[in-house]
Amino acid sequence: MVNMIEIRFHGRGGQGAKSAAQLVAESALDDGKYIQAFPEYGPERSGAPMKTFVRISDTPIKTYQPVVNPNIVIVIDPTLLDSVDVTEGLGKDGILLVNTKYDAKSIKKKTKFGGKVYVVDATKIALETLKRNIPNIAMLGALIKITNIVDISKLKEKIKAMFLKKLGEELTKANIEALMRGYKEVRGE
C-alpha cells in the first residue's frame, strides 16, 4: 500500500455509505494503520445524496482537509451517475467502483473515466441476501477484492462486532454473505 489511500463514497442517506466507510476504516485501524473517516451531508434526510470519506495511512495523518483527489471512488447509488460528477478529482491511475447491473465498459463510456472501472450488482446481492436494498456491505467485498486494502477476515470480524447485537445472528450472517458475494462477483475493465 502507498503511504496514504483516500476513498470517497457516493450514496444516498440510508444506503449505508457512512457505515461502510467506518467498517473499512476500523478494519484498517485493527491492522495497525492510521485512519480518518468522515461524512459530508447535504439536506439530512433519507434518500438525499451524500458523500463520506476515508483515509488510510501507514504514518500519522496530519491533514484534516476534505478529500479532493481520491485514489478510489465508490458509487453505492448508480442513479447518482446522472446527477453528480463522481469522477471529480479522480486521477487516471484511480479506481472507480460502481454498484450497477451494467458492465464496466458501459460505465466507462457513461462517466468518460479513463482509469480502472469495476462494477458489481450490489443491489441484487443485497436484495437476495438481506431482503433489503442496502448495498453497502456487498460494495465493501468488491473493494477488498480489487484493492486488498484491508484483510477480509478483519472486515468480517468488524461486521460481526458492529451488527450482531444490533441486528441479530441471522442478519449478521446475511451481511457476511453479501460481503463475500461482492468479493466474488466484482468485474472490471
Image (cartoon, helix red, strand yellow):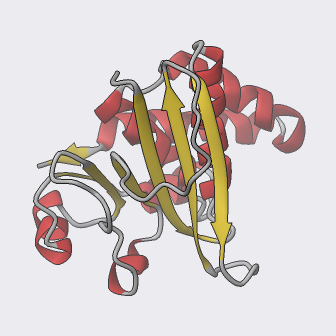
Residue 181 visible to the viewer: no
Quarter assignment of residue 62: top right
Q: Residue 16 in the image: x percent, y percent?
A: 64, 57
Decide: is 170 above or below 45. above
Determine the residue located farthest toward the top in the rendered image: 32
| Depth order, front residue of 53/65 | 65
- Asked if residue 101 lies left or right of residue 107, the reply is right
Q: Residue 78 in the image: x percent, y percent?
A: 39, 72
| Depth order, front residue of 81/162 | 81
Q: Residue at x 63, y 81 (%)?
A: 48
- Asked if residue 145 lies left or right of residue 189, the reply is right
| Depth order, front residue of 87/164 | 87
Quarter assignment of residue 14: bottom right
Quarter assignment of residue 50: bottom right
Q: Residue at x 42, y 59 (%)?
A: 68
Q: Residue at x 60, y 24 (%)?
A: 34
Q: Tag count in the figure?
A: 0
- Asked if residue 188 lies left or right of residue 21, the reply is left
Q: Residue 166 in the image: x percent, y percent?
A: 87, 42
Determine the residue located farthest toward the right in the rendered image: 165
Decide: is 13 above or below 180. below
Location of the N terminus (image quadrant)? top left
Q: Residue at x 33, y 65 (%)?
A: 100
Residue 54 visible to the viewer: yes
- Asked if residue 96 lies left or right of residue 58, the reply is left
